[in-house]
Image (tube, helix red, strand yellow):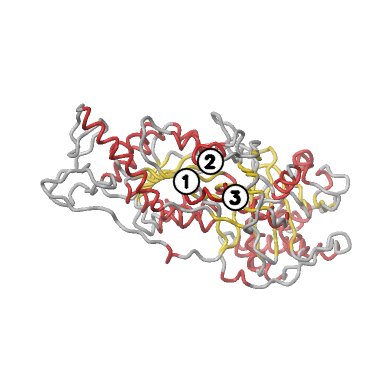
Amino acid sequence: MPFTDEVSIVLAGEAGQGIQSIEKILVALVKNAGYHVYATKEYMSRVRGGVNSTSIRIARYPVRAYIEKMDILVPLTADTTAHLSARRSRDTVVIGEKNAGYPDIIEIPFADIAKECGNTLYANSVAVGLLAGIVKIDSALVEKAIAANFAGKLRPVIDGNVLAAGKGYALAAALADRCSVAILPPDRTTDARALVSGTEAIALGAIAGGCTFACSYPMSPSTGVLTMLAEYSKTIDIIVEQIEDEVGALNMALGASYAGARSMVTTSGGGFALMTEAVSLAGMIETPAVIFIAQRPGPATGLPTRTEQGDLSLVLYAGHGDFPRIILAPGDAEEAFTLTAEAFDLAERYQVPVFILADQYFVDTYYDTAPFDVSRIHSERHIHGTNPEYRRYAFTDTGVSPRGIPGFGDGLVRVDSDEHDESGYITEDLAVRDRMVDKRLKKSKAVLERVVPPVFTGGERYATLLVGWGSTKSVIAEAYARLNDSTIGILHFSQVYPLPESARGYFERAERIVVIENNVTGQFADLLIKTYGTAVTRRVLKSNGLPFSAEEIVRAIGEGA
């Protein structure tokens, strides 16, 4: 196997077999050895059984995209053959137990080796040792990684796992003629980098943005953000609550915001559907809120543990009546951190709901990245002291009224979910109604002053413009690099509403516009047409619950040439 710069390893098996344990140890080990690493997972909605898989890329250069290519496949059950058949090639080396169902498998008795070391549960450590040996990671690092992973266990358990990993490592030498990976030496630039998932980046961004209150009713795949914030609440000043349902979650967040907190809720599409009345409440009472939505396939429960970009239209039009909103869709870990932090400032500055749209693929993917640049975070409080003449909804040139909170001054901070006048008193005066509607919508113009512009990649003389948003960023970028075609450009949006007027020129210069997104209708393509009046030449869509691969996009662009 003549590898030089990169190897792709796929682990597959049933839920409960410990695939994630192997992934966790191996990814950290590879990074500590000085290589760049990327890992993502796809899994079924069950505690036991089914077929789950983890894809790990090990490289001398940063890697951030999902690919189909499998250099090494390690099946831990016999049911993976059909599930992964489309990704196999004649060069894929399969390593596993005899009964795994592959006629060309290199047989490794993981369970028997583990039993010899004291417990069949050590089989995962055998696998870690074998894979580390195949990619020629130093054995001392392997022993250190295994010992660190089981540090909280009894000494016999630690020693047994270290022994099992050592036996797996030794097996790699015996397989040198059938499965040898010669990755060039690492560049060691990973030493100063951290392994960060989408979930972690969102949570850290919320903390950097000054979040002081977070609540949710747990819903996959968003729950990780809530649990991470709950963990941080032990050491920083943030209140985290699990609420009885999604209706209560957003209403409670609005109550906390009314009192001066920087509030956040986490949910997925089905949970957000229950929040739409409270979204309208946020619009009427002009109270800031940050709403994180990790998308998954619908309708209804759909595929609860899979990925899709299918909730853009839901978020864009959620709530009755018209009022401004902002929708952010980070494309990588750095954007997840900075845009989440920015979301809190935007919500408070303009007194509007701000949405962060991610998806299962995004939150469950992680790779090494440079430390986040906190100097880019500019968080200001936009709260004013009140006096006895204070009017919560005072008319202003921008539509943004001075925001007071109870107890910060002598004024009464009056809010009302019915239409109201400047002081917050309920009204049915039709003239006041017109002025209040105009006031709220006037903020839409102010919001455009802080819009996040799309990022263009390519030369000036492109003919085809590939357009993506959110989590497709890295995979489109890798496909673009593979295509190596100077007639192609990329335009990636990390803010999907409102869209900036400055982007119009990119579309006007293109002969063909190809929009790539993980949903069945092309929701973002529809928004582009509505905003810019542009003619979308082609929609490359996917909605089976899996993310795009780089190869898939290359094929799609090639076929459409």
Quadrant for the N terminus in the image? bottom right
Kindly identify which residue carries mark 2: 528
Residue 509 is tagged as 3
Left or right relative to 362: residue 1: right
Q: Which mark sits nearer the N-terminus, 1 or 2? A: 1
Badge 1 is on which residue?
499
Q: Nearer the viewer, residue 45 or 210?
A: 210
Label 1 crowding class (10 Å Cα cut-off): few <14, some 14-19, many 20+? many
Residue plotted at (29% across, 35% down): 437
User: Identity of the amino acid at label 1?
Assistant: Leu
When the figure is inspected, residue 170 is found, relative to residue 409, above or below; the finding is below
**206 lies left or right of 41:** left
Disc 2 is placed on an element classified as helix
Q: Quadrant of residue 2?
A: bottom right
Contact flag, marks 3 and 1 (Cβ < 8 Å): no
For the residues labelled 1 and 2, say whether their Cβ atoms are less than 8 Å apart. yes
Residue 272 picture location, percent across and down: 45, 35
